[in-house]
Image (tube, rainbow, N blue to C red):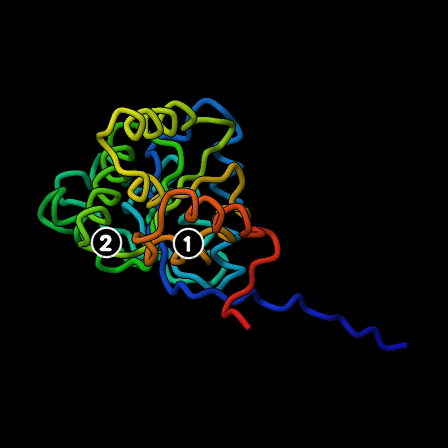
Amino acid sequence: MEIIQHQQPMKLSRFRRICVYCGSSPGKNPSFKLAAIQLGKQLVERNIDLVYGGGSIGLMGLISQVVYDGGRHVLGVIPKTLNSKEITGESVGEVRAVSGMHQRKAEMARQADAFIAMPGGYGTLEELLEIITWAQLGIHDKPVGLLNVDGYYNSLLAFMDKAVDEGFVTPPARHIIVSAHTAQDLMCKLEVHHITLINYHLIPEEIKLLEENMSPCTVTWPPS
């Protein structure tokens, strides 16, 4: 008897390329490496290419390998001065060397349709905050997501809320970034995140209502 195997339909996404910021170290928590693998698989399932910092070690190396093995294009952007520090083995995909850190961030932003920050150190945090600031200034309107693995970024999110309370960040600007604990939930949120970005004229209560009515695990793109 012939057995017919049915392939899972590929999820559709409005994104062609997503930039992922993450550490050149794997971190101490095994959940960080697992999250990198899961995020890489989410990109592959959604037919999304990866833009990242070009490293072959740590979380950067892990997610790039997963996406590359899944058949998607991987673009690593790395300053020439960091080649020996962040590339210790064989890199995958396309590696684009630029002159410095500013050029690296600009090229990554230019290539991507959205941004995701995973756990990382000073470099990851600096890249994340700059891309949020660029959105606040109207330089881009691309969604920004935070993969808050095991609460790694709880303190950062609390700081953002405190900045709103103290009048340093406006409530609409606080909603530039969305966060989730799992890669799947974060990807689903990012697919609809354009709603809040283009509705800055709404009052904070209306923005919150929009987000609460999003059903992350049932989001489809394009909308019917």
Q: Residues within 10 Å of mark 1 (few under 14, many from 20)?
A: many
Name of the residue lying farthest toward the left: 99
Residue 52, percent from left and from top: 31, 49
Q: Amino acid at mark 1?
A: His
Q: Nearer the viewer, residue 136 or 13?
A: 136
Q: Where is 36 relative to 114, above or below?
A: above
Residue 93, percent from left and from top: 34, 57
The residue shown at (38%, 53%) is 196
Q: Where is 81 relative to 211, above or below?
A: above
The residue shown at (52%, 69%) is 223
Sequence-wise first label, 2 or 1: 2
Q: Nearer the viewer, mark 2 or mark 1?
A: 1
Mark 2–mark 1 distance (CA, rounded to whole Å): 17 Å
Name of the residue lying farthest toward the right: 1
Q: Secondary structure at mark 2?
A: helix
Residue 5, percent from left and from top: 75, 70
Residue 175 quadrant: top left
Name the mark on residue 109. Answer: 2
Q: Name the side, left or right, on which 112 lies relative to 150.
A: left
Residue 21 quadrant: top left
Name of the residue lying farthest toward the bottom: 2
Q: Residues within 10 Å of mark 2 (few under 14, many from 20)?
A: many
Residue under label 1, please give it.
193
The number of discs equals 2
Q: Nearer the viewer, residue 8 or 25?
A: 8
